[in-house]
Amino acid sequence: MTKVRAGITGIQGYVPDYILTNKELETIVETTDEWITSRTGIKERHILKGEDRGTSVIGIEAVKGLLKKTNTDPSEVDLVICATTTPDMLFPATANIICNAVGIKNAFSYDIQAACSGFLFALTTGSQFIETGKYKKVIVIGADKMSSIIDYSDRTTCIIFGDGGGAVMLEPTTDGTGIIDSVLHSDGSGEPFLHMKAGGSRKPASAETVLAGEHYVYQEGATVYKFAVTNMAEVAAEIMERNGLTSENVDWLVPHQANKRIIDATAKRMGVGEEKVMLNIQKYGNTTSGTIPLCLWDYEKQLKKGDNLVLAAFGGGFTWGSVYVKWSYDSEDSK
Ligand SMILES: CC(C)(COP(=O)(O)OP(=O)(O)OC[C@H]1O[C@@H](n2cnc3c(N)ncnc32)[C@H](O)[C@@H]1OP(=O)(O)O)[C@@H](O)C(=O)NCCC(=O)NCCS
């Protein structure tokens, strides 16, 4: 019997209009365009402005575009999973808010939180519902409004993050394409190095926590960097070995966009040349759950049915992982 796999049959990204450049950051914190570019590869990032506008705004725009592009009636969608670290509210799930706004009424929906690996965790989870034959149309979203938890007086974090995301449609395939394999990891001992101190049940929001700046990203950059550079490269290499992939037959590395130097190290470990590496960190910075769908969106036109894609990410938690996707459609005309 032919194996049923979850194929990605459409991708749509969204970034808000406002662009925060390195030049503007120079006027906010003590930094330079040269320092940010050489240490991270980032030139600008998009910021979601306006009152009462959360991550769902990004997800809604992405899902609306995805439904249109894939000619899908909202009533056909079975399941929606939203990976995000910056939900609109602690509850209800941002996925529910998105569904309500776009008219998806027959699906159940929930959020997944795995920091920058969130999209890969959600993609793997969503693919299981297709592979079992239970559902026919699953939407997986990765979106974050990182500007809502960034301290714009902390030059070590405010230069890195931006807002944005995207959504993919998963449908059953029997032609050998789709999500072939995934390797996912978590290690809770990473908590001290990357987290948000307050606003959860351990330390609920209070006047004191706000005053102490505990609702912002806390990051020990050098420790995170060391962890990321090793683990993202290793997990990408592991998925290649498990699936008999070589530097020749990998068509694209789709890396989480946190720091260009980490991406370069991963590509080197895989033996993959820079022409095969999806890169848009210069435009968007680190959008957490949004980086991988934004890469797929930006490069969609260059993808061909049967292309071998290795997706790789790492993030707070720590979390990290890799997913091997055999691309399911020719994309020349679809964006
Ligand atoms: C944050 C990061 C870019 C900092 O780069 P780095 O090369 O490690 O820099 P360091 O933290 O060692 O700091 C080096 C110096 O630059 C300074 N510096 C930090 N941010 C700066 C900035 N925006 N502009 C200018 N100087 C800066 C530091 O204060 C330090 O100065 P000192 O030597 O006088 O103390 C890097 O650690 C990183 O990318 N880490 C991973 C972060 C990440 O990926 N997070 C997301 C996880 S998904």
Image: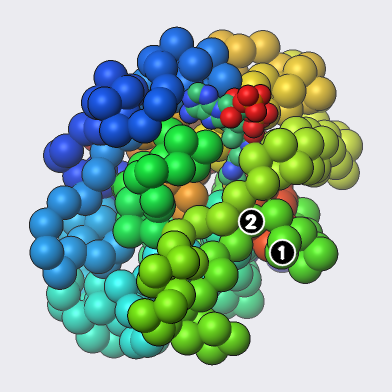
Residue at screen point 42% across, 82% down = 205
Where, by quadrant of the figure, is residue 293 drawn? top left
Mark 1 residue crowding within 10 angstroms, few (<14) / some (14–19) / many (20+): few
Lateral position of residue 60 relative to residue 112, left or right: left
Image coordinates of residue 314 in percent, x first then y, are: 66, 48
Count up the numbered dots. 2
* Residue 115 appears anywhere in the view: yes
Lateral position of residue 322 relative to residue 294, left or right: right
Assign ligand 1 to one image quadrant: top right
Q: Is mark 2 within 8 Å of ligand 1?
A: yes
Residue at the disc numbered 1: 191
Coloring scheme used: rainbow
Image coordinates of residue 329 in percent, x first then y, are: 43, 39
Mark 2 is on which residue type? Answer: Leu
Q: Examine the rendered structure and indicate whether residue 298 appears above or below residue 90.
A: above
Residue at screen point 44% across, 63% down = 213
Residue at the disc numbered 2: 194
Residue at screen point 30% across, 62% down = 55
Image coordinates of residue 102 in percent, x first then y, are: 17, 71
How far is the residue under mark 2 from the one under mark 1? Answer: 6 Å
* Quadrant of the image containing the C terminus: top left
Mark 2 residue crowding within 10 angstroms, few (<14) / some (14–19) / many (20+): some
Mark 1 is on which residue type? Answer: Glu
Image coordinates of residue 212 in percent, x first then y, are: 46, 66
Depth check, front residue: 278 or 168: 278
Depth check, front residue: 6 or 229: 229
Q: Do labels 2 and 1 touch, CB within 8 Å?
A: yes
* Quadrant of the image containing the N terminus: bottom right
Where, by quadrant of the figure, is residue 264 drawn? top right
Please tell me whether mark 1 sits on a helix, a strand or a loop: helix
